[in-house]
Image (spheres, rainbow, N blue to C red):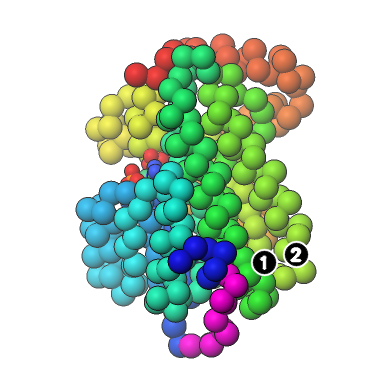
Amino acid sequence: MKISEIIKSKPKIIETEKKPIALVTGASSGIGYSFTCLLASKGYDVIAIARDHQRLYELENKLLTKFNAKIYVLPLDLSINNSVDKIAEFLKKENLMVDVLINNAGFGVHGAFHETELQKELNMVNLQIQSTLSLTKLVLPYMQERRSGFILNVGSVYSFSPVPFQSVYGGCKSFLLSFGTSLAHENKKYKINVTTLCPGITQTEFRIRSNIGKNINSIKHKKTSGMSADLVAEQGYKALMRGDLICIPGLTNRIFVQIATHLPTSLFSSALTLVNSFRGVNSKNS
Ligand SMILES: NC(=O)c1ccc[n+]([C@@H]2O[C@H](COP(=O)([O-])OP(=O)(O)OC[C@H]3O[C@@H](n4cnc5c(N)ncnc54)[C@H](OP(=O)(O)O)[C@@H]3O)[C@@H](O)[C@H]2O)c1
């Protein structure tokens, strides 16, 4: 059944004794993993979505033991077009309504646009934009009807500026900021909070998956620079509950955004190109 059909056949909301439900995309690692643990510790049952089912089942066991939280494991590739239809069917079958939606799953592609792989970039756009829009469209009517709900989209400090050599990634993150902020304003009257979380460098597998930086062992031993994923998720959660439009965790990241938004675009883009060339971001994705 398609999302549009499920929205049309929306069932009457029946208040139950169920715990509140959070849905987290990209729950198998990094910031999404931290969000899942945090939400379980706060008394939510969590629908955890990512491709790596092994990691999701390990997380399920951990959080059941630690917090007695129910984790609904949904192994899905969200870059595939109809994956959100499967989530819609699952919610309907289990009669679940989402109280907190965390649109977090993402990866990066770097290199000059004429050298990068189009299919990788299209998958990234599908994952970051198409799945965020479809999931939001799916849960929003229920939230509006109940006059309560929380949606957090994971952007980046790159949401605020062009990002040469990560042009499509930067474009996705700018889109998410613009979309989230507009959505927040539209939904004030429904008492729905929408926050865009804009982290900078965070100690996750992101840079390894994007072929930027050091090996995975150093990340596991927390030797990489940047904030911990737990701290990023914690600050994002607090901002979401407060109803902040934007959350930029960490002073360095807030300074970066101040510079990005105050310097002339061409000057900032040149500076970012230079900095990223030292970080090895400007070369072709391997
Ligand atoms: N780390 C940073 O420095 C940083 C900075 C700014 C913003 N961000 C943003 O933070 C978000 C989370 O990234 P992270 O840093 O936590 O990286 P991460 O550790 O690599 O986690 C990414 C998550 O997304 C999931 N994912 C990737 N492709 C997917 C797909 N096709 N379908 C479903 N799930 C998929 C991964 O799970 P599977 O592989 O199991 O599918 C994983 O759970 C991303 O949106 C990223 O752009 C990160």
| Residue 36, horizontal then vertical, whole percent | 40, 59
At 44% from the left and 53% from the top, the residue drawn is: 82
- Image quarter for ligand 1 equals top left
126 and 55: which is toward the camera: 126
Is residue 11 highlighted in magenta? yes
**In the image, which residues are magenta?**
7-16
Please say if 141 is above or below 53: below
At 32% from the left and 62% from the top, the residue drawn is: 73
Mark 2 nearby-residue class (10 Å; few <14, some 14–19, many ≥20): few
Q: For numbered disc 1, what is the local secondary structure?
A: strand
- Which residue in the protein does label 2 denote? 188
| Residue 218, horizontal then vertical, whole percent | 28, 31
Please say if 187 is above or below 223: below
| Residue 37, horizontal then vertical, whole percent | 38, 60
- Which residue in the protein does label 1 denote? 192
| Residue 215, horizontal then vertical, whole percent | 28, 27
The amino acid type found where label 2 is placed reads: Lys
At 36% from the left and 24% from the top, the residue drawn is: 211
Quarter the C terminus occupies? top left
The amino acid type found where label 1 is placed reads: Ile
